Image (cartoon, helix red, strand yellow):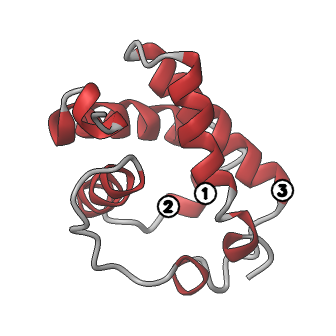
Amino acid sequence: MSTFYEKYGGEDTVAKVVDYFYDLVLADDTVNHFFKNTDMEKQRKHQTKFISYALGGPNQYSGQSMAKAHEGMNLQPVHFDAIVRHLREALTHFGVSEEDIADALGKVGSLRDDILYK
């Protein structure tokens, strides 16, 4: 069985999803302040590798642990939920099936405890 990653066109597609996702995130006052001082080009590349891996692609993610990456941000459930909502919207926009979205968001949800209240 092909992975989600292969099924939807690999890293090229993931990069488009990530771009669209960050456009939504940066337009959202609930969460955009977290990215004020972020190199967004670097962030987009980094996130593309991370999401590719999360969706069954090759592991090229060499970043920090989730807990470390979000240290000092004190993210709250409202922030996490906004990010998940934008990711759902981006995946939907690119024609990803509801079942595959549920699977992807389940993987993201499993990171919740590593991300919140750090």
Q: Amino acid at mark 3?
A: Pro
Q: Which residue is mark 1?
A: 33
Q: Is residue 74 above or below residue 56?
A: below
Q: Is residue 30 above or below residue 74?
A: above
Task: Say left or right for 68 vs 23.
Answer: right
Residue 77: which disc? 3
Task: Determine the CA span between mark 3 and mark 2.
Answer: 20 Å
Q: Quadrant of the N terminus?
A: top left
Q: Tag 1's secondary structure?
A: helix
Cβ atoms at labels 3 and 2 below 8 Å apart: no
Quadrant of residue 20 within the rendered picture: top left
Q: Can you give x and y, in whole percent of width and height, for residue 41 in the image? A: 24, 55
Q: Earlier in the sequence, mark 1 or mark 3?
A: 1
Q: Which residue is mark 2?
A: 36
Q: Tag 2's secondary structure?
A: loop
Cβ atoms at labels 1 and 2 below 8 Å apart: yes
The image shows a total of numbered marks equal to: 3
Q: Amino acid at mark 1?
A: His
Q: Earlier in the sequence, mark 3 or mark 2?
A: 2
> Badge 2: how crowded within 10 Å, few (<14), some, or many (20+)?
few
Task: Determine the CA span between mark 1 and mark 2.
Answer: 5 Å
Q: Residue at x 21, y 59 (%)?
A: 58
Q: Quadrant of the C terminus?
A: bottom right
